[in-house]
Amino acid sequence: MKDVGTGIIVRDGKIFIGQRPEGKPLAGLWEFPGGKQEEGESIEECLKRELREELNIEATVGKHIMDTTYRYPENEFCLHVYMVTIPENAKIKLNVHQNSAWVKASDMNKYKFPPADEEIIKKLQDIAV
């Protein structure tokens, strides 16, 4: 099983999501930023590194929201979901995603996400982020 740090960035009542690029697994689907934990790093360190690599931002990892596990045919993932804050003046640069959006939790059903993210979306809608 692979451990994945998953960040929920909220600004003005909306959550940041990115669209996976063409040529990658699950291309075109929307996701929360983050990525796989490397050996020797904590999930929090993983999440900070991934946000730096994917979005060119320095993030502060906050409250742990939940963990959820999902098995794809080729692998099983445990997503460790955290609230993340970024500086108000942070300029997000898409280094991995082909598109991005700021979306209310209640509107996330308008976007197609990987199955692994479904529990996260339900949780975000329940806590009214």
Image (cartoon, grey):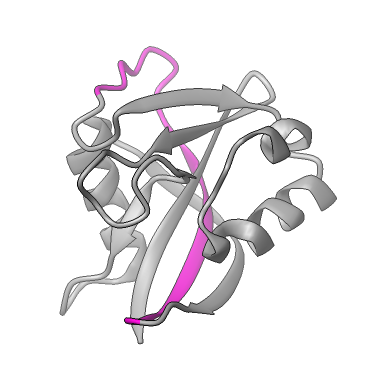
Residue ID at (75%, 55%): 122
**Furthest-bottom residue in view?**
1
Q: Is residue 71 left or right of residue 3?
A: right
Asked whether residue 75 is drawn in magenta, I would say yes
Asked whether residue 91 is drawn in magenta, I would say yes
Q: Is residue 103 left or right of residue 29?
A: right
Residue ID at (38%, 12%): 89
Point out residue 38 in the picture as x, y percentages from the top left corner: 18, 72
Vertical arrangement, residue 75 with respect to residue 67, above or below: below
Point out residue 68 in the picture as x, y percentages from the top left corner: 58, 73
Point out residue 110 in the picture as x, y percentages from the top left corner: 68, 33
Residue ID at (19%, 32%): 95
Vertical arrangement, residue 8 with respect to residue 97, above or below: below
Residue ID at (50%, 23%): 101
Q: Is residue 92 left or right of residue 118?
A: left
> Which of the 4 quarters of the picture holds residue 102?
top right
Viewer-proximal residue among 39 and 103 = 103
Viewer-proximal residue among 24 and 35 = 24
> Which of the 4 quarters of the picture holds residue 3?
bottom left
Count up the numbered dots: 0
Instruction: Name the image quarter holding the N terminus.
Output: bottom left
Magenta segment: 74-93
Instruction: Name the image quarter holding the C terminus.
Output: top right
Vertical arrangement, residue 76 with respect to residue 65, above or below: below
> Which of the 4 quarters of the picture holds residue 35?
bottom left
Viewer-proximal residue among 78 and 29 = 29
Vertical arrangement, residue 12 with respect to residue 76, above or below: above
**Furthest-top residue in view?**
89
